[in-house]
Amino acid sequence: MFDPLRKIARAFRAPSTQEREMAYLNGSFDRIDLEFRQRQVDRGLFRNR
């Protein structure tokens, strides 16, 4: 009964910090870009907000 409501709620929720970080890292083009992005995440790019 509550399954459709849970699906709707999941669709409207904001992504977590971990999900945003992983999406950012997955968008890298090569190893150099990945390393750069990892350093940015380690410095708190998504956690300072």
Image (cartoon, rainbow, N blue to C red):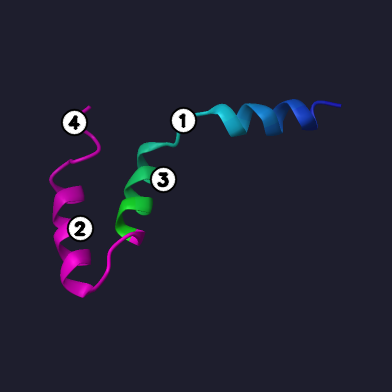
* Mark closer to the chain start, 3 or 2: 3
Image coordinates for residue 40, horizontal then vertical, percent? 15, 50
**Residue under circle 1?**
14
Looking at the rendered structure, which numbered label has been put on residue 19? 3
Looking at the image, the residue that sits furthest to the right is: 1
Mark 2 residue type: Gln
CA distance for labels 1 and 3: 10 Å
Residues under numbered marks 1 and 3 in contact, where contact means CB atoms less than 8 Å apart:
no
Q: Secondary structure at mark 4?
A: loop
- Give the number of the mark in front: 1 or 4: 1
Residue 46 sits above or below residue 9 on the image? below
Quadrant in the picture for the N terminus: top right
> Which residues fall within the magenta stretch?
26-49
Left or right placement of residue 7 versus residue 29 in this view: right
- Mark 4, residues whose alpha carbon is within 10 Å: few (<14), some, or many (≥20)? few
| Image location (x, y in percent) of residue 46 | 25, 38
Q: Position of residue 24 (x, y in %)?
A: 31, 52
Q: Which residue is mark 4?
A: 48
Q: Earlier in the sequence, mark 1 or mark 2?
A: 1
Is residue 46 left or right of 18 when viewed as pictured?
Answer: left
Looking at the rendering, which quadrant does residue 20 occupy?
A: top left
The label number, if any, that marks residue 38 in the structure image:
2
Q: Is residue 3 above or below residue 42?
A: above
Task: Return the disc, 4 or 2, that comes first in the chain's sequence.
Answer: 2
Kind of element beneath mark 1: loop
> Disc 4 or 3, which lies upstream in sequence?
3
Q: Amino acid at mark 1?
A: Ala
Residue at 52% of width from left, 28% of height from top? 13
